Image (tube, rainbow, N blue to C red):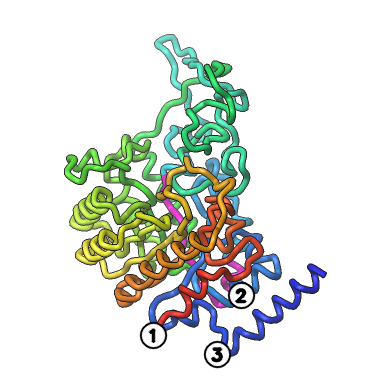
Amino acid sequence: MKKLSTIALIATIVLSACGPKDPGLKDAYKNYFKIGVAVTPRNVTDSLQKAVVLKEFNSITAENCMKPGEIHPQPGVWNFQQADAIADFCRENGIKMRGHCLVWHSQFANWMFNKYDENGNQVVERDENGDTIWVEQPARGGFGGFGGFGGFGGFGGPRPQGAPQGAPQGQRAQGQRQGQRPGQQGQAQAPQMTKVPKYAKATKEEFYDSLRAHIFTVVNRYKDVVYCWDVVNEAMSDGNDPNVPYEQSFRQSTAYQLCGDEFILKAFQFAHEADPTADLFYNDYSAWTPAKRTYIYNMVKKLQGEGAPITGIGMQGHYNIYDNPTIEDFEKAIQLYLELVDNLQITEFDVRINHEAGGQLQFSRGEGQVLTDSIAQLQMAKYDELFKVLRKYKKNFSCVTFWNLGDRDSWLGANNFPLLFDGEYQRKQVYYTVRDFKK
């Protein structure tokens, strides 16, 4: 019975795609901006999910598999299979892609910060006698060590935006101390240690060589189907003071500590050299807040003056149904960014039903939360007021991208109910709030 109902639903989606009585989101907004979605390979191979994607969206982002650490985990090692699958789906169906992303402090190709010899071997540091220098670090896989982070560290699925590189597994529960097992109270167990060689670090110039080669390889592989790139992602700090000195407005990532803000300039220059026709975005979460919008504005203005071809700003999203964002500050941020660029996008849109927001890893996954009628009304109201602002600035927004297809896919967890489609990829009531606006 479930199989028959699925087939019937697919048939309904396909048949209705041509009819005026049931437009998809992309049809409703054809005179405004593209409507995009972040997908996994499963979303474009499962027949039901594929049908929803084709009916509703005309821009696609690979959620996880184009990030540097996923596609290029070691020198000379490339994992193109999943990214190619999504790109080929887009090519076959005439859909353009947003490239996400080329530089990000999390899920980055951290090997770029190491030094290698002419044979491609990592260089170790030696003492005055020529002997290898050894250091202690937590053993991988032991408690306190860094677990595999292809998923959320114990929850499965791709790592979300803002997840710190090497965060301990299970670092999710709100209020849980770092290094503490879920449900554990009292003292944390000491990590097991192991001795490893101390490796030499790359110079700034060596890092740039690796970064340029990475960007050229990825951009050239997908330039026929990618119309814009998130070149640098989340480089600004989460501070709350808009008046801090310029240097303190940056996230203190490894790239920033090595290069200062020049790594952003170089990344945009490399991306433009690789594809002069692509729109190039700086992308960040909480981009509406007074502090972060000031940080982003100052950085973009300074680096544009130094020759960075930053042509767009991506305001990620990751909002909630209450006070994040305030509509006043949301519009102020838009107006501020339009002083610098003509091209804005909402790149990672979702609206969760609790008071949390932003792109950081630590959040509750909504266990026990219920989408009551009153909560659903608040969510519809928030989506409605946000889209009213976006439609007001339709000449400046080129795309609005939802971060995942249905609630079951969301990095926030299905019980945060953040999207327009439920866990079975059925339209929720909020879908019609977004689609059926007054033209």
The tag earlier along the polypeptide, 2 or 3, is: 3
Question: In the figure, residue 144 lies in which quadrant?
Answer: top right
Mark 2–mark 3 Cα distance, whole angstroms, equals: 24 Å
- The location of residue 69, given as percent across then percent down, is 51, 45
Q: Amino acid at mark 1?
A: Lys
To which residue does mark 2 refer?
92
Q: Quadrant of the C terminus?
A: bottom left
Q: Position of residue 70 (x, y in %)?
A: 55, 47
Give the distance between the C-alpha atoms of the residues marked 3 and 1, in whole angstroms.
Answer: 15 Å
How busy is the neighbourhood of tag 2: few (under 14 within 10 Å), some, or many (20 plus)? few
Query: Quick check: is 167 in the magenta stretch?
Result: no
Q: Are marks 2 and 1 in contact (CB under 8 Å)?
A: no
Amino acid tagged 3: Pro
Location of residue 276 in the rendering, given as x and y in whole percent from the top left corner = 36, 67
In the foreground, 317 or 343: 317
x 43%, y 9%: residue:
129
For disc 3, the neighbor class at 10 Å (few under 14, some 14 to 19, many from 20) is few
Name which residue lies at 17% across and 40% down: 245
Magenta highlight range:
87-104
Q: CA distance from mark 2 to mark 1?
A: 32 Å
Q: Badge 1: few (under 14), some or many (20 or more) residues near its Cα, within 10 Å?
A: few
Q: Which quadrant would residue 360 be assigned to in this image? A: top left
Name the residue furthest top. 129
Mark 2 is on which residue type? Glu
Q: With 403 as the anchor, is 397 left or right in this view?
A: left
Q: Is residue 141 above or below residue 352?
A: above
19 above or below 269? below
Q: Is residue 91 magenta?
A: yes
Mark 2 element type: helix
Mark 1: secondary structure:
loop
* Towards the viewer: 263 or 405: 405
Q: Which residue is mark 3?
A: 20
